[in-house]
Image (spheres, rainbow, N blue to C red):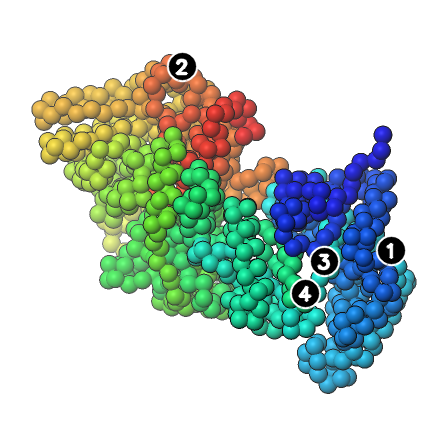
Amino acid sequence: MGSKKYVYLFSEGNAGMKDLLGGKGANLAEMTNIGLPVPPGVIITTEACKDFTRLGQKFPPGMEEQVRGKISLLEENLGKRFGDKRNPLLVSVRSGAPVSMPGMMDTVLNLGLNDRTVETLAQVTGDKRFAMDCYRRFINMFGDVVMGIEHVKFERILEHQKDKAGVYFDNQLTAENWVEVIDEYKKLILRETGKSFPQDPMEQLFMSIYAVFNSWNNDRAIVYRRISKIPDDMGTAVNIQVMVFGNMGNDSGTGVAFTRNPSTGANELYGEYLINAQGEDVVAGIRTPQPIAALEQEMPEVFKQFADVCKLLDKHYRNMQDIEFTIEKGKLYILQTRNGKRTAQAAIKIAVDMVEEGLITKEEAVIRVEPGQLDHLLHRRIDPQASLEVIAKGLPASPGAASGMVVFDADKAEKLGQEGKKLILVRTETTPDDIHGIVAAQGILTSRGGMTSHAAVVARGMGKPCVCGCEAVQIDYGAGEFHVGDLVVKEGEVISIDGAAGQVILGAVPMIDPELSPEFQRLLEWADEVRTLEVRANADTPQDAAKAREFGAAGIGLTRTEHMFMAQDRLPVVQEMILAAGLQERQAALDRLLPMQQGDFYGILKAMEGFPVTIRLLDPPLHEFLPDAEELMVEITKMRLTGGNADELQAKEDLLRKVRALSEFNPMLGHRGCRLGITFPEVYAMQARAIFQATAQLVQEGCNIIPEVEIPLIMDVNELSFLRKVVTGVADKVMQETGVQFHYTIGTMIEVPRAALLADEVAAEAEFFSFGTNDLTQTTFGFSRDDAEGKFLHHYIEEKIIDENPFVVLDRRGVGKLMKLAVDLGRRTRPDLLIGICGEHGGEPSSIEFCHVIGLDYVSCSPFRVPIARLAAAQARVKYAGKVKQDYGTL
């Protein structure tokens, strides 16, 4: 049996061989095969790299002979030979992994030059300066990339030479200057490595191949793979390609172009080029390139050929291409093509245009747009042309951008907001008490807390920008200022935040308003045709509900009634209800809350007429509605020391006793949710009455209303049957009192593992399940979310103990297994059981895909993520069309 095939000519490969030939190599082969003018070359496979690593950094047997064999084929075809005095072969050596991977080995150009062939190059081109320039570039790259000598040491020699010659730019040096530089470069290599610069082109080639394979495991590459979740065993290919020169005079040049505009998506050539230049000159920015359109004037023939090539590539790959090209003495060569990076706006326009041009199907268009990219389009963003003074960086917790004056206190924020002032609420962290301040603010900045802290969750729900965990911001509430290093920003001064980048910026910045372009609307319509998963929104106000409908939500999957209790006009009544000495006092407070709650539900149900609205009864522990114990202690101490009003002092002390009595060691697992409803059934009865009276009122007005009453935190069917009786009892009474018949359903949230394990029993009393995956993740992992994110979760992810933050991306193996079990058990008892998800995962693309696979009916997310969810649900349908995956752990 012969040795493995490690080396391919470009003409032997194609685009489908990406894993073996790397992304760049497979594309070069594909272009060669469709007849484009690609400089010929050979590819050493990723298999050779894997075997090299396995053999302890040694070339695998047979590889070197194969390389020599293919190079001699190239030599024959071109009539050029390595090291030949009359017609030397010169090549470039580049790495090329199967996926785009910055951080790999840099390119080596002009390999094959030595003291002899450089003279030939000078004769052939009639330009000694050009030949010496090529040679010194090669020695510099080879010394740096292959022999490991820092680039800066070569730079010093060059700077010294320029000073000596009294010039500023490299291209002002003469051939004689370059000869001196080359001599100094060679001495540097000998001094640093103890070896002379190799003169034999074959030796140069094998040393370069060795360096490419070695670079697969350099620190940069390993770190990049970890961040981008690229497997370590993929290996890289090596591309060896015949050199073409863009710097052979004014009929030569080099450039980069996109087949469509990467910012707007417009179907027009976009790019730039330089006359008489090598590729790295364009990137290095030493000379200002010309727009590609100018090539039409300079070289009309070449431009026409290039424009045709671009059209051909755009059609062939059915995607916008990013193309590198060189013109050598009036002849066009294509060096590389790949799918071009583009903005979200361009991605949508290109996908929709390509459907209309008949290049791709609607399903392909839906798959082409990254759901996460849509975030930028749904929020105000900073004008990319603006110059910014970034003073600190935190976590990009909620996308969008805002400018406003700094305010440290929620009450003050509310007051200033009512006066029409623009402001940014800056807090160490936010609590539910700050909600009125968050509503009034343009954006939120916190110095503590993670991507799923209170501020982040609330801001995302409201579509407001938020930067969290910005530890550089040291807040001094007493002095009314914050510090970043030596910089002091006082309350009332203007700052801006960019929630998508996590940046804090000094002063106001210019913004761009979001708009749903016609292409965006069309793409979402196609997504709706494809998907089977419904998309609802989480909304607590009629304004949120209206925004959700505008973005295409088909109902509300979660209305949190506690957010309504936090409003400043309600909070005192809620506190009276909590502090009531007995049932009579409590009922009096509830009677005052009833019309307020009824008004809330009337507004939301009306805004969502014709669509289902899930209303969750009170969930958080009662102490969340009361003042902070420490703050009360401070107030009481102050009053005692300053001889404050005795009655007021007594009232504060009573309040503190009650706050302490209600405080819990672990409130998240404490007296909350249905446990409150069972202890104080009158609270849930008041909420049920508010829902049903609002429903009856709307039905009388001729509206089609679909309320779904949701009982939170169930862990046993007996809790649900107890509270179901309370709710149905109230519904019957309201129907009797109003003489109006209406339809409603009662269901529960599945947010503790026991409820999921006993879902078949729970389903006997529930007409729907909604997975509260924020709490289900906490209770399955045994993590307290804020503590985990603040203290150790990032460390777990860095050490690869877990792959992702489970509060951001649904944990399919653990939490997902419980969900799958609950779906199967629940539907065994009640086949028509409606099942959805309303945790934050409902707006995260990978989690939405999982919900599609396990057969949920809907996902629910914040209004601003509805378009993202519509697209992600369609992508899941396309991906799994006709497939049923049982092994949900590996999906």
User: Which residue is drawn at the image coordinates 76% and 71% (left, top)?
Assistant: 125
Measured in 3D between alpha carbons, the distance from the residue under mark 1 to the one under mark 3, in whole angstroms, is 17 Å
User: Which residue is drawn at the image coordinates 49% and 65% (left, top)?
Assistant: 390
Residue type, numbered disc 2: Arg
Residue density around tag 4, few if under 14, some if 14–19, many if 20 or more, within 10 Å: many
Determine whether label 4 and label 3 are within 8 Å by CB: no
Disc with the residue nearer the chain's start (1 vs 2): 1
Q: Which mark is residue 828?
A: 2
Observer-side mark, 2 or 4, equals 4
Question: Residue at label 1?
Answer: 203
Measured in 3D between alpha carbons, the distance from the residue under mark 2 to the one under mark 4, in whole angstroms, is 72 Å
User: Which residue is drawn at the image coordinates 28% and 61% (left, top)?
Assistant: 416
Q: Which mark is residue 107?
A: 3
Determine whether label 1 and label 3 are within 8 Å by CB: no
Answer left or right for 23 relative to 656: right
Residue type, numbered disc 3: Thr
Disc with the residue nearer the chain's start (1 vs 4): 1
The quarter of the displayed image where residue 60 is located: top right
The quarter of the displayed image where residue 530 is located: top left
The percent coordinates of residue 374 (x first, y second) are 42, 48
Q: Is residue 91 above or below residue 740?
A: below
Answer left or right for 192 relative to 553: right
Residue density around tag 1, few if under 14, some if 14–19, many if 20 or more, within 10 Å: few
Disc with the residue nearer the chain's start (2 vs 3): 3
The percent coordinates of residue 470 (x first, y second) are 49, 56
Disc with the residue nearer the chain's start (4 vs 3): 3
The percent coordinates of residue 786 (x first, y second) are 48, 42
Question: Residue at label 4?
Answer: 328
Residue type, numbered disc 4: Glu
Q: Secondary structure at mark 2?
A: helix
